[in-house]
Image (cartoon, rainbow, N blue to C red):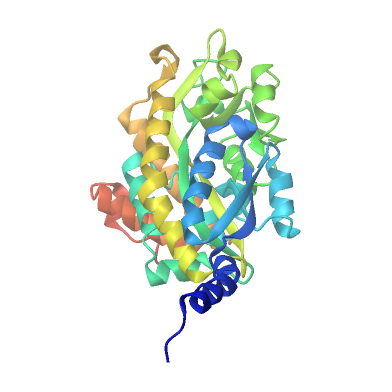
Amino acid sequence: MRFSKGLMAMAAAVMLPFSSAAQAAEERLLCVFDILGSSGDVYNVMKDYAAAAQAQGYALKLKAYTDENIAAEDLKANQCDMAAITGIRGKHFNTFTGSMDSIGSMPNYDVTRMVMQVLGSNNPKIKESLRGSSYEIMGVMPAGATYLFVKDHNMNTVNHLAGKSISVLEYDVTQARMAASVGMTPVMSDISNFAGRFNNHSVDICFAPAMAYAGLELYKGMEPNGGVVDYVLGQLSMQLIARNGRFGDEFGDWSRSYFGQTVLPRAMRLIEQFDAGIPEKWWIRISDPDRERYDEMMRDARVEMTKEGLFNKEMMTLLRNIRCRVDGGRAECSDRREIDW
């Protein structure tokens, strides 16, 4: 049987609306915490992510938050389909990736790069840890090494930190524990006010990534005789967390790969620019023996807090193995104390 051209055209016209509907991107809301709002680097990275996601079948509408707590609460309340928040806050959604920001666990950017690549690899065992009963980690990006910013240049050893006050995030008990363990006085703060307290000298010390030097004007708190202790306390991360059921499995795989292959190199370039943006006069260099001693202190604290359930053991094992793969000469690589207990 042969169809006339008119009949074929009619059939095409009838089918067209259904075809277009099937190809239309599904709309979702992506909530983004960026302390600088829609003008910040994190928001800009997520704008490009949203543009790329369009080709994967999702039209992501971005909403900027300058208060991270509200972004996290909106994700819990189903007001957001996915949210970009810090790993420290994200710990309440996934303890595996939420333990990445633990003290001293990523001592340099070589380790950080490898950790991010592993998380973006879609390895079946890793994916299993990224999926919980309610939320799924869709991507992780580094936000920079965290350092101690001090108002007095003489606060250059642990002994000199005793008795000093320090801003700690009130929703991360591990920060207060670590500060108290070396004799400092923790002052409960949040991301919106810790820098102000340091800058007006209400506290002696705060810790933050290098981006805060200019972004939050921490140089004001260091005037006239402060500095930045050149020891990496940890790595801050931003994590993209989605509610289960709002995105397909294939999109999750694409998203994690996008973070590992596209977001990671871009984030590292930004981080290195921020680190280089702190003038040499502010850096407080420490000796190699002190650095090794602090590494051991950090490890002791991590082991203790992991045993207490504050850090995820699986992630602690992964991080230890990557540290030793990058630098097999580290003291911790000759024993398995952080793994076998």
Q: Residue placed farthest to the left in the image?
A: 329
Q: Residue placed farthest to the bottom in the image?
A: 1
Q: Nearer the viewer, residue 176 or 44?
A: 44
Is residue 154 placed above or below 298 in the rendered structure? above
Q: Is residue 42 visible?
A: yes
Judge from the rendering whether residue 212 lies leftward or rightward of residue 80; answer left or right.
Answer: left
Q: Nearer the viewer, residue 333 or 24?
A: 24
Judge from the rendering whether residue 280 lies leftward or rightward of residue 301; answer left or right.
Answer: left
Q: Nearer the viewer, residue 260 or 57?
A: 57
Q: Residue placed farthest to the right in the image?
A: 77
* Residue shown at the point (62%, 22%) measured from the top left: 204
Q: Position of residue 54 (x, y in %)?
A: 51, 54
* Residue shown at the point (54%, 70%) measured from the top left: 19
Q: Nearer the viewer, residue 47 or 299?
A: 47
* Residue shown at the point (31%, 43%) measured from the top left: 110
Is residue 169 placed above or below 98 in the rendered structure? above
Judge from the rendering whether residue 95 lies leftward or rightward of residue 114; answer left or right.
Answer: right
Q: Position of residue 145 (x, y in %)?
A: 45, 36
